[in-house]
Amino acid sequence: MKVCIAGLGAIGGLFAARLAAAGHEVSALARGATLAAMHARGLALTSVKGERSVQHITAAADARDLPTPDLLIIAMKGHALAADAGALAPLIGPATVVLPAMNGVPWWFLRDAPLTSIDRHGHIATTLPLAQTLGAVVHLTCHAVAPGEVRHGFGERVIVGEPAGGSSQRCSDVAATLTDAGFQAEISSDIRRDIWFKLWGNMTMNPVSALTGAACDAILDDELVRAFMARAMTEAAAIGARIGCPIEQSPEARMAVTRQLGAFKTSMLHDAEAGRTLEIDGLIGAVHEIGARVGVATPDVDALLGLVRLMARTRGLMTGM
């Protein structure tokens, strides 16, 4: 399959390296130091076992310099996509399947009206045709240790599904391509529910880790912080029940699963430490917005949003509001 990766950070780099190693024709949209590293050294991936491989793939800063792919995997941060979605237009042909492999709530999540926290100016919806888009949930960790250098942490699971639900041939084709590249690819008949479940699991841990600088085990060891996060998760679960994405797990059970992963740093903490813009809107801003729409009070979600937003603004780690 002809695949293009938009955004060669941690997740995008992992997809690009794995798919290229599996023999697929991979190109990438990249800029700055990452593009320079690609041209100079290629894309390096260190596996969970510590094995390092390098893939040399076509990369460019301008989408017009890349071939039109069968599959466009978008691995950009949410704020970057909102600001620069139009740059992806040359990569989308009439048969291109668009797969956003991103954290948080996607722009198409609510059918009645767009989410202003995700797509304030409508650039994403205008550029990315919903009829060609699949939903995705990525359950794995990896870290960009340097431009063009990605280290895989743990997990292989990637879920894909039709935004409207059900199954399709294109879901099967994409899942088969990802399986071929070593991922544990699954097809969901209700991808919205899978997206909300993952969001529910990380919408508190990510911002709390960025605020405190603490790894997940230390966060869960503090009973007051743990109780605060459980209250915010309860609010998000109530929202899920209103929008057809019920959560059957308790906050305490979910945090017990996270505790088993040990002392790991969230992606938002990695970004905060590196001085990168934080993914606030997709992870928690959208929860605040959806709660207001469906009439669910979210005092603890709102407090967390306000605190992490203020921290990001003060440290220059924020765009938008």
Image (tube, helix red, strand yellow):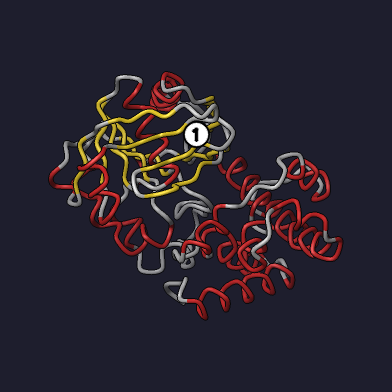
Q: Local crowd at mark 1 within 10 Å, few (<14), some, or many (≥20)?
A: many
Foreground residue, 187 or 278? 278
Report the quarter where the N terminus lies.
top left
- Relative placement, left or right, of 33 versus 306 is left
Q: Position of residue 78 (x, y in %)?
A: 43, 57
**Image position of 74 with respect to 120: above or below:** above
Q: Kindly identify the residue that appears in the image at 81 percent across and 59 percent down.
A: 226
Report the residue at 42% width, 74% height from top: 320
Asked which secondary structure carries label 1, the reply is strand
Q: Quadrant of residue 170?
A: top left
Measured as percent of width and height from the top left, residue 299 is found at 73, 73
Count of picture labels: 1
- Seen in the image, is 164 located left or right of residue 19? right
The residue located at (37%, 28%) in the rendering is 53
**Residue ID for mark 1:** 161
- Rendered image quadrant of residue 233: bottom right
Residue 316, quarter of picture: bottom left
Q: Is residue 194 left or right of residue 76?
A: right
Q: Amino acid at mark 1?
A: Gly
The furthest residue to the left: 65
Looking at the image, the residue that sits furthest to the right is: 223
The answer to whether 128 is drawn above or below residue 24 in the figure is: below
Q: Residue at x 57, y 76 (%)?
A: 311
Which sits in the foreground, 269 or 171?
Answer: 269
Image spot of residue 306 (x, y percent):
62, 76
Q: Is residue 7 above or below residue 210?
A: above
- Whole-percent x and y of residue 155? 58, 32
Decide: is 289 above or below 283: below
Nearer to us in this view, 50 or 224: 50
